[in-house]
Amino acid sequence: MTSTAFSDQNGVYLMGMTDAQDLRNYITARFTEGELQFAYELFLKNAQDLGKAEHIPPLQALWKILDAAYKKKMPPLTCGEGCAHCCYTGVMITKMEWDGMINAARKNGLDLMELVERSEKSLHRVKKAVESGIDPEKIDWYQMVINQRCPFLDDNESCTIHDDRPLDCRNMVAFRDACASKKLEHAQRGGLIEEAVAPAVIAKLQYDATPKMKRRKFDGTAPLRLIQHWLLDWKKKKSTRKKKK
């Protein structure tokens, strides 16, 4: 099977929303190991350099570079404000992405406790799973919060932290038409090599930002959790601080 078997004229994978392993297989078939390694090293260096030059966190620099790559190499997005079908599924993120989202929420004046209250149903599901003792690797986290709105989605179906949204959200895009249902019938991914190596770049940025005494051996990945899981942790820490006062 060729690497274009499931792609359109833009080289964008058309079935990436159904199986993550299928998407990984597609990416490794489309790009050589050498191409991926070169792109990873270049993307990482550019994010670090831009962050220093503009005095912004390296993750924000990475978002700028990824956005520029989409604009330069891909057709205009058909996604628009209020088009939020993809905001009703699980989104797995790193701690670095979560920290960026929290900082954006505070900057935008969001009440995080209000987010907790609005997301009570999905948070309860995640809390039960975390406390169940089941191996986290065996839990289908995406399915757990399917059809549940993202905590950061407002009443107008718009993202309240759009500029700082995580990679999972940035990669869920449409170029052919706007999705009309939660089946995400026009959502596509796999079009950019920058998209393919971004998870490893984020993992390395997070690794470098971790105190040396807490670092594990870098393997190109970083632990991922649902947005709701990170929000639960935030709520727990906030409650602990209140009890200590």
Image: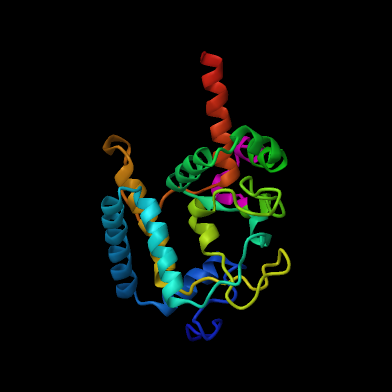
In this rendered view, identify the residue nearer to me: 68 or 147. 68
Does the magenta portion include 175?
Answer: no
Task: Report x, y in % for residue 21.
Answer: 53, 67
Residue under the image location 61 percent in, 49 percent down: 139
Q: Residue 81: x, y in percent? A: 63, 61
| Residue at 56% across, 72% down | 77
Q: Position of residue 32 (x, y in %)?
A: 35, 77
Residue at x 42%, y 64% (from the top left corner) = 66
Nearer the observer, 87 or 125: 87
Would you place residue 17 above or below residue 139 in this image?
A: below
Q: Position of residue 54 (x, y in %)?
A: 30, 52
Q: Quadrant of residue 184?
A: bottom right
Residue at x 54% of width, y 53% of height: 162
Q: Which residues are magenta?
A: 128-141
Task: Give yes or no for residue 135 being in the magenta stretch.
Answer: yes
Visible in this render: residue 140?
no
Counting the numbered discs, the total is 0
Q: Is residue 80 visible?
A: yes
Q: Which residue sits furthest top?
A: 245
In the visual, does 104 lie left or right of 123? left
Q: Is residue 211 above or below residue 40?
A: above
Quadrant in the rendering for residue 174 = bottom right
Which color mode does the image show?
Answer: rainbow
Q: Dividing the picture into quarters, in which one does residue 133 lie?
A: top right
Q: Is residue 90 above or below residue 5?
A: above
